[in-house]
Image (tube, rainbow, N blue to C red):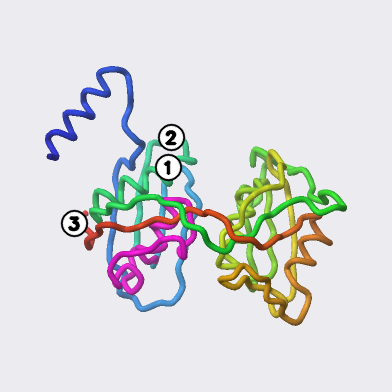
Amino acid sequence: MRKIVQLAIVALSAFGQTSEPSFEVASVKLNTSGIRGWSVAPPKNGKYSATNVTLHMVIAQAYRVHEFQVVGGPGWIDSEYYDIVAKYAAGADSSKIHLMLQALLADRFQLSARRTKKEMPVYALTLARSGSKLKPARDPDCSASPVSPICGGFQIRQRSRVTGESVSMQQFCDVLGGLLSQPVLDETGIQGVVDLHTEWSPDGVSTISEAGQSVAMEGASIYAALQEQLGLKLTARKDLADQIVIDRVERPSGN
């Protein structure tokens, strides 16, 4: 079977098609340090690195979903921790890192996964009646000198203060989804990148029940913060969202 797949790839290349992007070299090692923290560095200068991460976390990153949207697999994908260091061509498109990770997971962990849709409680992010209060990005290409360390990304403190520089609405929805543990759909219609800052009371973060009902909590909620500070509105509903189903995975092969 593997020979057939390899021949198919060669045949496609002969007709001018290229295979999916992949890392040039990668190291995957079990982390047994026992430390509690983890980190995933932004891809830079042809290098990707993740320290003390679970396989569950890496699969979510590879398929651009949240961990709660990845289902199946053995218990060790949440209990074992890994250090991953990988290099890609300096001129390669860093926005394709997720595809490189998918190739790495298939190669080293024999991962076989599929993307499905499932109806679940979600949030929709839309413009508030007052209109957007977002600011155009000061450095949209992150080319200023010196460049801000969070340009193109976010700084999140205490899970209730979010600062983003040169970020898209989809990126912001991804961050909100992680904080709220539910998918957030971008329905703002805002194109390009912006700078933003918002903060709220941690006690005011609301959740959505399985019935799709908003459960209010005491304190200044994230709802009010987004509307007053950014001119955005969160609405709870049920909708179809991506779910990644793990069909097969094995502990990693050697480096």
Report how far apart the C-alphas of labels 2 and 3 lie in the structure.
Answer: 25 Å
Distance of mark 3 from mark 1, alpha carbons?
Answer: 22 Å
Choose the circle earlier in sequence order: 3 or 1: 1
Foreground mark, 1 or 2, reads 2
Q: Are marks 1 and 2 in contact (CB under 8 Å)?
A: yes
Residue 209 included in the magenta stretch of the image = no
Q: Are marks 3 and 1 in contact (CB under 8 Å)?
A: no
Q: Is residue 180 left or right of residue 117?
A: right
Secondary structure of the residue carrying numbered label 3: loop
Give the farthest residue toward the front. Answer: 211
Q: CA distance from mark 1 to mark 2?
A: 8 Å
Give, as a three-letter code, the residue at label 3: Gly
Residue 149 visible within the image = no
Amino acid of disc 1: Gly
Question: Does the stretch in magenta take in 75?
Answer: yes
Of mark 2 and mark 3, the one earlier in the sequence is: 2
Q: Amino acid at mark 2?
A: Ala
Where does the magenta region start and end?
A: 53-82
Mark nearer the viewer, 3 or 1: 3
Q: Residue at x 73, y 51 (%)?
A: 126
Q: Tell me where residue 150 sits by quadrant.
A: bottom right
Q: Secondary structure at mark 2?
A: loop
Residue corresponding to mark 1: 46
Q: How many marks?
A: 3
Q: Residues within 10 Å of mark 2 (few under 14, many from 20)?
A: some
Q: Which residue is pictured at 33% across the width and 27% down the height?
A: 18
Q: Which residue is mark 3?
A: 254
- Measured from the top left, where is residue 1 in percent x and y? 12, 39
Residue shown at the point (51%, 58%) measured from the top left: 119
